[in-house]
Image (tube, helix red, strand yellow):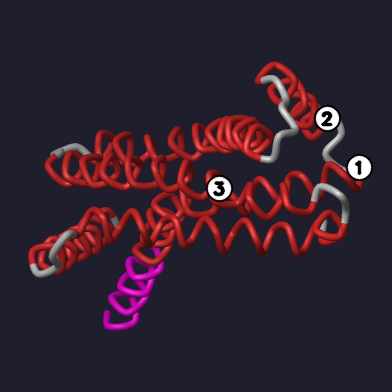
Amino acid sequence: MFANWRNSLQEFLDWFLRKRAHIRFFFPKLFLLFVLINLVCYWWALLTTYPQHLASWKGDEYVLLGFPVAVLGAIFDAMSFYVTLAIVRRALASQSNVRFVSYLSVDVFIAVLATFWVLFAFVASGWVVSIVLDRPETLTYRTELYEGRFWKAILNPLAPDNIRNIYFGMMMGASALLPTLYHFGVAIYSMFRWMAGRMLAIRAR
């Protein structure tokens, strides 16, 4: 199973390096892609959870909020992307399966860190937008606002408003979760390939 897992990751890494070598201005294009993904996630989350906010007196704030949130999200995504590549290289270079899994498990930490980055992005972006719209709010107020929502979601996750906020946060962190989801997907795929190989070997006896 681990051999299949390693081979799948190696194939992906080789494919990526070949593609990157032929793409000019790769990092700016990657960054813009992440900005676009974050913008799409923001608008999808907003329209599926709080569409009424767009018709409220703060509608312009929600429209503008998406842009700095998307940029800050893209910064995290781009950095985590390169960190993930470094992790994959180290994992593939390791001789022990325990070390291999340990290296890839770091992506779980990145996914957790993404949650707090999303909170920071909304706090900072909301503060900037409030200044642009001449409705100044303090960073302390914005921090307390989102900190309160965070703890409400932790302590009472099944409340309707908290479910919407959790869903919103998951959508905003979706792009940062892609490497982790990819690792899990490759691991599951490798496990099924290994099981299928074992079954074929047993039948062939």
Looking at the picture, how far across and down is residue 184, in whole percent? 43, 54
Tell me if residue 53 is in the magenta stretch. Answer: no
Label 1 to label 3: alpha-carbon separation: 21 Å
Three-letter amino acid code at disc 3?
A: Gly
Residue furthest toward the right? 159
Three-letter amino acid code at disc 2?
A: Lys
- Please report whichever mark, 2 or 1, sits nearer to the chain's N-terminal start: 2
Residue at (10, 67) in percent of width and height? 18
Task: Check the image and report above or below for 72 versus 116.
Answer: below
Residue at numbered disc 2: 152
Three-letter amino acid code at disc 1?
A: Ala
Contact between marks 2 and 1 (CB within 8 A): the answer is yes
Circle 3 packing at 10 Å, graded few (<14), some (14-19), many (20+), is: many
Residue furthest toward the bottom? 204
Label 2 to label 3: alpha-carbon separation: 19 Å
- Please report whichever mark, 1 or 3, sits nearer to the chain's N-terminal start: 1
Circle 1 packing at 10 Å, graded few (<14), some (14-19), many (20+), is: few
Magenta segment: 191-205
Q: Quick one: 92 or 140, which is closer to the camera?
A: 140
* Quadrant where the image shows the C terminus: bottom left
Looking at the picture, how far across and down is residue 152, in whole percent? 83, 30
Label 2 to label 1: alpha-carbon separation: 9 Å
Q: Quick one: 61 or 114, which is closer to the camera?
A: 61
Residue at (9, 69) in percent of width and height? 22
